[in-house]
Amino acid sequence: GQQYCNQIRKNRGQLGYIWFLDEVFIKINGVLHYLWRAVDQDGDEIDSLVQKRKDKNAAMQFFRKLLKGQQVPPIKIVTNKLKSYSAGKRELMPSAEHSTKQYKNNRCELSHQPSRQQERQMRRFKSQGHAQRFLSCHGIVNNLFRLGRHLMKASNYRMFRERSFDEWDRVSCIQKST
């Protein structure tokens, strides 16, 4: 699974210039952990990270992971009012504008729903590593196949859906029979 996700990550285009960041609680074997997630303005998940804390060091680690491999940092980040974001942003992304207005972060808040549904279906995560491996791949594959059907004509949807399956076939080395 991880090899497929790495291939998809290599081939994805430029990310959006506005990033929405959020964190939620997840329970792993009865212990609270935090799932940090970043989404761009198009709703595509950039990356996620599972950690035991939500302090400045955790935010810095999350920002480093997001910026790794990016040619261009975001112009603007949108977060909730957690102070860790401000502290980490000041050190690693000083040029990015930071918005903490209420309800502006709903795009990222809603991005947790597909992974929450999958988490319930799997009957929770067994370890922090298990959660991290699954969630990082789930977001990338979800980006590939979640196309926003209600936002486009049926013919365009079919074309983009076909491209998604072609990309998946190429990444997973499936040969089409002609």
Image (cartoon, helix red, strand yellow):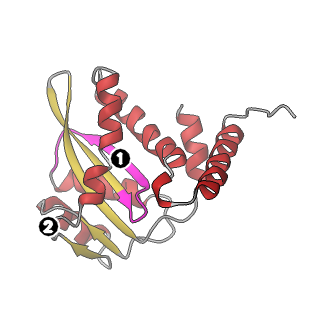
Measured from the top left, where is residue 8 in percent x and y? 59, 47
Quarter of the figure that contains the N terminus: top right
Residue segment shown in magenta = 39-54
Of labels 1 and 2, earlier in sequence is 1
Q: Which residue is mark 2?
A: 102
Amino acid type, label 1: Ser
Residue 53 magenta:
yes
In the rendered view, would you say 151 is above or below 123?
below
Q: In the drawing, does residue 155 fall left or right of residue 73?
A: right
Q: Nearer the viewer, mark 1 or mark 2?
A: 2
Report the residue at 47% width, 71% height from top: 72
Report the residue at 39% width, 71% height from top: 74
Circles 1, 2 touching at the beta carbon (< 8 Å): no
119 vs 62, nearest the viewer: 119
Mark 2 residue element? loop
Measured from the top left, where is residue 61 in percent x and y? 30, 52
Amino acid type, label 2: Gln
Report the residue at 17% width, 56% height from top: 56
Measured from the top left, where is residue 143 in percent x and y? 49, 49
Measured from the top left, where is residue 90 in percent x and y? 23, 72
Mark 1 residue element? strand
Q: Residue furthest right?
A: 178
Quarter of the figure that contains the C terminus: top right
Residue 48: image tag: 1
